[in-house]
Image (cartoon, helix red, strand yellow):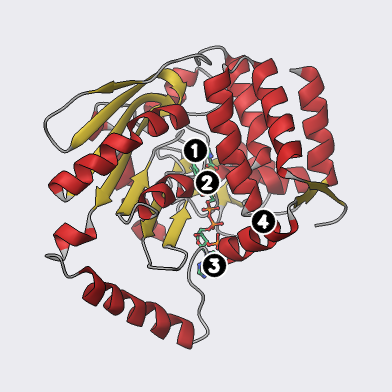
Amino acid sequence: MSETVKLNLDDIQTLCQTVLAKSGFGPDHAQAITETLATCQFDDCQSHGLFRLFMCAETMKAGKIDGHAAPVVTPSDNAIVRVDAQGGISLLAFQSALPVLIEKTRTHGIAAMVINRCYHFSALWPEVERLSSAGLAAMAMVPSHSWVAPAGGTRGSLGTNPLAFSWPRSGKDPFTFDFATSAFARGEIELYRRAGKPLPEGVAIDKDGNPTTDPQAAMEGAMLTFGSYKGSALSIMIELLAGPLIDDLTSLESMEFAEGAGGAPYHGEIILAFDPAQFSGGRVSENDARAERLFADIADQGARLPSQRRYAARSRNMARGFVEVSKSLYDDLQVLAQQV
Ligand code: NDP
Ligand code: PYC
């Protein structure tokens, strides 16, 4: 990072609250968004930290989101907790239904949270880590906008469709991964465009279907999935599980719904939680030891676990009490705070 600015938690909260309140988000939504952005920024998650304030403001400007929506959790006797975000940002809906998901998972061994009619702009790891910190294993998935071409295709049909997983570890940070099924997240391409840097090969094609390393051409053309047909198939699975399965929109439909107005995609989300106590027949500590043996074998080869960089950033930033963001991002956020 070239020139940087140091921001402590108060600075982050003030900046977020100013932008969000001025954009038109009510206090509950502003609080939920601020918590997530601060959590991401303290983990040095650049594409989904403070940078996402632009997307929040843009989503409000696009005119369809309800910044004051009150999520509604539907009671059920089964293992599915359904929460209708009522056209607001997903985060408040997630928070409202989380205690029910935890309770249902402990009752049934496996349970799912289905969020409908939400705008989604955030990283998924803060959500799955809320579940692993309650001793549960968890997965989360969302579609987005149809920016991504399927393997062998020439135009966007799929979303950047992130998949997140978290596994609780006694006395240690959980094992967590969270990544887009596109080769790059859209947010990452936006960061390359801001920095005027070319993309690596294999990330995108232009609008004529030719490979490109130009971030602007990539955004006008189509992004590619990671791992060729394998990432493409995973991405399609996410479309199905977090779309038609839960009676909500695919990335194609989310794009149509936006009518070119920009902002965050609008769709549903599915979060699955597993109770290790029930799945292992009560033999949690013996099976935790197996998992730990696997992690140790990986580390022993000099390989790193996913999220290790993030946890190191978290402990460093928490200890010193501030994060460093690029001065150009900080300046642009100050302008945003004046403009909205
Ligand atoms: P990254 O490629 O930055 O990272 C993906 C994961 O891989 C992280 O858990 C990361 O851990 C891990 N990782 C990276 N390098 C290594 C390595 N060498 N060895 C082992 N593990 C490694 O993620 P993306 O850019 O694809 O996604 C970034 C964020 O964007 C995600 O949080 C995702 O949820 C979000 N997103 C949200 C969307 C939405 O619609 N809401 C859409 C698409 C993405 P570490 O962090 O420690 O480096
Ligand atoms: O980075 O692909 C992305 C993204 C989409 C919605 C929020 N982030």
Pinpoint residue 5: horizontal percent, then vertical percent: 84, 47
Tag nearer the camera, 4 or 3 = 4
- Ligand 1 neighbours mark 4 (CB distance < 8 Å): no
How many other residues sit within 10 Å of disc 4, few (<14), some (14-19) or many (≥20)? some
Q: Does label 1 point to a residue whose CB lies under 8 Å from ligand 2?
A: yes
Q: Is mark 3 within 8 Å of ligand 1?
A: yes
Could you say which disc has been placed on residue 223 in the image?
2
Asked whether disc 2 touches disc 1, contact meaning CB atoms under 8 Å apart, the reply is yes
Q: Give the amino acid type for the residue marked by disc 4 in the picture.
A: Met
Q: Earlier in the sequence, mark 4 or mark 3?
A: 3
Mark 2 vs mark 1: which is more N-terminal?
Answer: 1
Mark 1–mark 4 distance (CA, rounded to whole Å):
36 Å
**Residue at the disc numbered 3:** 308
Alpha carbon separation for disc pair 2 and 4 = 35 Å
Residue tagged 1? 147
Q: Residue most toward the bottom?
A: 300
What's the residue type where badge 2 is placed? Met
